[in-house]
Image (cartoon, rainbow, N blue to C red):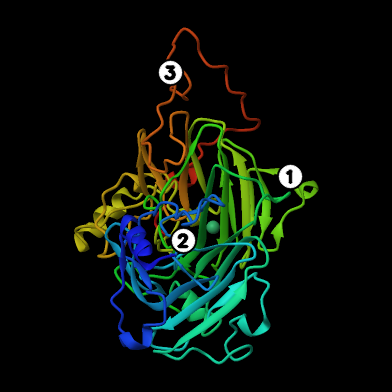
């Protein structure tokens, strides 16, 4: 690709700008200009310059790295560097990433491409890049100390190999790995098949994102890097609901969604209103005889799952991790359960000492979804997102598959809330002449569900 074309296309993309290089110009003259991304919005698909041999992926709240062709080799330039990621509007986290963002840009190539990736290290410590799932020469595998010396700060290394296998892959450091991944260093790699492939369908929409997690104390801005399991921010591509872009489809579209897990726990990813099949993993395409319908697929640590569905039910369909604490924002885990506890006189006594004290959760925690509570600076509400019918009481790993009959092919813009046809929504039962069937009586003596709470002194030990 000509450099001018590259720059023009980059200028067309949302928020794309050419980085001001910190390294001496002469030293970089032989390198492809490293594009950087300044926006956390979802960038449109990056079509290859010579025709359209594949349907490009759309990385949720991410972008695809432009490349240049040099002597038949696709050249990319990744810059490992500190970044500030806007995980949600007003919630900015100091991360490490690539080319201005965490995750880094998606690398998108075609089976058989010879690929050359320059990696410049602008971090305060050494790093490497491991190309997760790829067939490559051992010396290109990016394991610091085992297959190569580390890339010291200020240095540029070059990786070069042939993308031999089509599929969905990831990249991440294999150097001070716990710290560097906890800081957000990771990215996606997509290798499209060369021509038609018997096990890889042509799709109308192809989405991709990484599952990631951070430990950011409310009110702070830098992840705690020594956290082993107790992460409190559950994100897709370093974004949290409602700041994760929706997945948009035209009615009848075949939709592929590629999901990679670089957190330290598994995530059962669940889609409403449709069935899907797992058509590929980081090991490659799944044989047809080994596919079965699912509505939830578990993505274990270090795995990729590639799912496919026909979007044939119009609507706004929830798409989320099924661990319910992963669809919450930053939360205090040590809050006692107060369901059924009458806190009224307790609150009055505490308010004499703490005037703003607020009791939480005597009927559950749903009230938090609509409460405007004072938050520490630089965090986001625990349960948030408002739909046309009220608060969603969700956060973290949650988005919406929006299926519309009138969505134009190739249009990824948010069509807004779904307008349900009249008479197709759950509603309050209001017909007095047509009472609901009687509820069967429970056997044995009936007791109020919250009898415990109303016993004298029942709340005293809280
Ligand atoms: Cu999860």
Q: How far apart are marks 3 and 2 (CA)?
A: 36 Å
Q: Tag on residue 234?
A: 2
> Circle 1 sits in a helix, a strand or a loop, which is it?
loop
Q: Is mark 1 within 8 Å of ligand 1?
A: no
Q: How crowded is mark 1: few (under 14 residues within 10 Å), some or many (20 or more)?
A: few
> Circle 2 sits in a helix, a strand or a loop, which is it?
strand
Q: Tag on residue 422?
A: 3
Q: Is residue 80 above or below residue 388?
A: below
Residue 375 percent location from the top left of the image: 27, 60
Whether residue 226 can be seen here: no
Q: Mark 1 points at which residue?
A: 292
Say which of 265 and 84 sits in front: 84
Question: Which residue appears farthest toward the top when viewing the image?
Answer: 433
Name the residue: 55% across, 67% down.
262
Say which of 83 and 444 sits in front: 83
Q: Distance between the residues labelled 3 and 1?
A: 34 Å
First reached walking from the N terminus: tag 1 or tag 2: 2
Name the residue: 31% across, 80% down.
21
First reached walking from the N terminus: tag 3 or tag 1: 1
Compared across the picture, whether 234 is left or right of 369 comes to right
Q: Distance between the residues labelled 1 and 2?
A: 28 Å
Name the residue: 55% across, 92% down.
149
Residue 192 percent location from the top left of the image: 60, 57
């Amino acid at each position: 690709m000509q450099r001018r074309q590259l720059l023009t296309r980059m200028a067309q993309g949302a928020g794309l700008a050419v980085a001001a290089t910190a390294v001496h110009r002469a030293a970089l003259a032989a390198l492809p200009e490293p594009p950087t991304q300044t926006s956390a919005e979802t960038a449109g698909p990056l079509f290859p310059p010579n025709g359209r041999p594949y349907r490009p992926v759309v990385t949720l709240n991410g972008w695809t790295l432009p490349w240049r062709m040099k002597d038949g080799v696709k050249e990319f330039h990744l810059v490992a560097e500190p970044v500030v990621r806007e995980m949600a509007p007003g919630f900015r986290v100091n991360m490490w990433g690539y080319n201005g963002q965490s995750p880094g840009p998606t690398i998108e190539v075609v089976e058989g491409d010879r690929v050359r990736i320059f990696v410049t290290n602008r971090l305060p410590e050494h790093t490497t890049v491991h190309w997760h799932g790829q067939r490559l020469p051992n010396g290109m595998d990016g394991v610091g100390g085992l297959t190569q010396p580390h890339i010291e700060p200020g240095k540029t290394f070059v990786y070069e190999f042939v993308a031999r296998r089509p599929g969905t892959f990831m990249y991440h450091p294999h150097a001070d790995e716990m710290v560097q991944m906890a800081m957000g260093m990771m990215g996606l790699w997509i290798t499209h098949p060369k021509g038609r492939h018997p096990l890889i369908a042509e799709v109308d929409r192809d989405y991709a994102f990484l599952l990631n997690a951070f430990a950011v104390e409310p009110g702070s801005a830098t992840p705690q890097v020594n956290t082993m399991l107790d992460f409190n921010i559950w994100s897709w591509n370093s974004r949290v609901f409602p700041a994760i872009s929706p997945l948009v489809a035209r009615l009848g579209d075949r939709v592929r969604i590629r999901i990679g897990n670089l957190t330290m726990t598994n995530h059962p990813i669940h889609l409403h209103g449709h069935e899907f099949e797992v058509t590929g993993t980081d090991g490659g395409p799944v044989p047809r005889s080994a596919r079965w319908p699912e509505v939830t697929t578990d993505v274990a640590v270090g795995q990729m799952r590639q799912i496919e569905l026909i979007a044939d039910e119009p609507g706004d369909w929830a798409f989320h991790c099924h661990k319910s604490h992963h669809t919450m924002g930053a939360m205090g885990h040590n809050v006692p359960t107060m369901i059924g506890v009458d806190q009224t006189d307790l609150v009055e006594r505490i308010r004499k000492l703490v005037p703003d004290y607020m009791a939480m959760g005597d009927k559950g925690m749903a009230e938090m979804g609509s409460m405007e509570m004072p938050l520490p600076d630089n965090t986001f509400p625990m349960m948030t997102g408002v739909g046309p019918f009220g608060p969603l009481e969700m956060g973290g790993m949650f988005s919406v598959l929006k299926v519309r009959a009138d969505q134009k092919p190739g249009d990824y813009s948010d069509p807004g809330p779904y307008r349900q046809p009249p008479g197709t929504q759950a509603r309050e039962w209001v017909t007095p002449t047509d009472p609901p069937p009687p509820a069967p009586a429970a056997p044995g003596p009936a007791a109020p569900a919250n009898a415990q709470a109303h016993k004298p002194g029942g709340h005293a030990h809280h």
